[in-house]
Image (cartoon, rainbow, N blue to C red):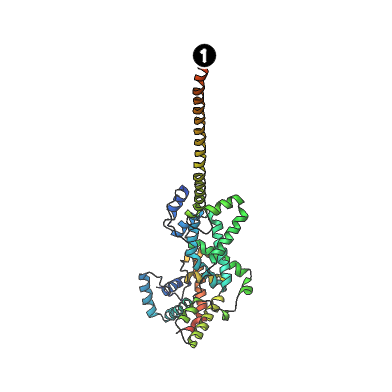
Amino acid sequence: MNCPTKRNEDAEILLDYCARKLAPLQTAEFEIHLKQCPDCSRLVEAQKEVLAALKAWTPGPVSADFDARLYARIAAEEAQAAPAWRLWLRRIFQPPVPYPLWKSAVPLIAACAVLAVALSVRMPDSVDHRLRADKVDIEQVEQTLEDFDILTPAVQAPAGSM
Amino acid sequence: MALIPAQPSANPRVKKDMEAVAALDRDAELMLRVREGDDISFALLLERHRGPVVHFLYRMVQNPSVSEELAQEVFLRVYRSRATYEPTAKFTTWLFRIATHVALNWVRDGKKEKGQESLDEQVVDGVDRQVRDRQPTIEQEMLHQVKMTEVRQAIDALPAKQRAAVLMHKYEELEYAQIARALNCSESAVKSLLFRAYEALRSRLAHMAG
């Protein structure tokens, strides 16, 4: 095996060994080399220390409003690019912050419910009114016919007596 | 936010691309759905990669507010280019290529001096809080703070490209080929960058042993 400290091309073995990314066969081969090469041993120890020091450096958490700020920027960009009606439709069906689709149907369901209540309140009244009008008409006709029946003998009597 | 499992797409273009990326990764599949207008897939991608991208940029620029601002720019670019996205590589390679480009531009534009906070004043690192949770002695905490400051200074002293290579190699565990694509150079150039970068770090941080 070529010594990784001698050739830059072989340095990858050293890096991969320390990062535990080397294949098992190469690892075994390199460990044999390590026992014979003090330069490589020193380098491996130093590299492991560097990696341990870097591992200890952990950044803090991301701000809670990161997504909200990003979606606001996306919305602002789209507002500049798209016509108003398309944006309005998109806000309903494809909001930047996703939410369940059923929520879009709530205003429609509410509007349908209001319409149904309004119709059910209005319709019986109009039907009754029409029925009453029909009933009055029939009564008037019957009354007129009865009046004719009463008047007819009175008109015919003088003719019979003659 | 409700996480909805991705459903098979009916679009033949997406279907064809899906088959092509089947061997690549799930992120590329999600990005193809974003291309078709699925914003929930974008939210999933953001959820998966928000942390790694912000942390990579934080280590690059060493300023929490600037790193978040740059990360927003990265995800904004991802969203902007959704219509032209083609899954020719792993999604993380493409993502870190954008992130590296944004960070290197920021460094090149000389905004570093203006935006950088004093390294001594930084107590935002998660490790500081972890140490406090275990209730170390004041001496231990001070020693840790000194060590972390040295690590940050050692990373900061690296040339920007070497720094990006080390951060992608150590923290994001990207392959040499992926780092090469992100930095727009050859694999052998990446190995050389990494070797020189780790050499500089070994000489700067050698005294931290034990």
Q: Residue furthest front?
A: A161
Secondary structure beneath label 1: helix
Residue drawn at (49%, 42%), measured in percent from left and top? Answer: A124
* Image position, residue A89 (x, y; %): 56, 51
Q: Looking at the image, which is closer to me, B40 or A95?
A: A95
Q: How many marks?
A: 1
Locate the N terminus of chain A by quadrant.
bottom left
Relative to A29, is A96 on the left or the right?
A: right
Are there few (<14), some (14-19), or many (20+) residues within 10 Å of tag 1?
Answer: few
Q: Is residue B25 something that shows in the picture?
A: no
Relative to A27, is A113 on the left or the right?
A: right
Q: Is residue A143 above or below residue A5?
A: above
Amino acid type, mark 1: Ala
Which residue, given by chain and number where applicable, does mark 1 sit on?
A159
Residue B76 appears in which quarter of the rendering?
Answer: bottom right
Q: Is residue B197 something that shows in the picture?
A: yes
* Image position, residue B163 (x, y; %): 54, 72
* Image position, residue B169 (x, y; %): 48, 70
Residue drawn at (56%, 68%), measured in percent from left and top? Answer: B68
Q: Is residue B168 above or below residue B88?
A: below
Q: Is residue B111 above or below residue A138?
A: below
* Image position, residue B206 (x, y; %): 49, 82
Residue drawn at (52%, 46%), measured in percent from left and top? Answer: A118
Residue drawn at (55%, 61%), measured in percent from left and top? Answer: A71
Given the image, what chain letter belongs to the residue carrying mark 1?
A: A
Q: Residue furthest top?
A: A162
Relative to B74, is A3 on the left or the right?
A: left
Q: Looking at the image, which is closer to me, B30 or A70?
A: A70
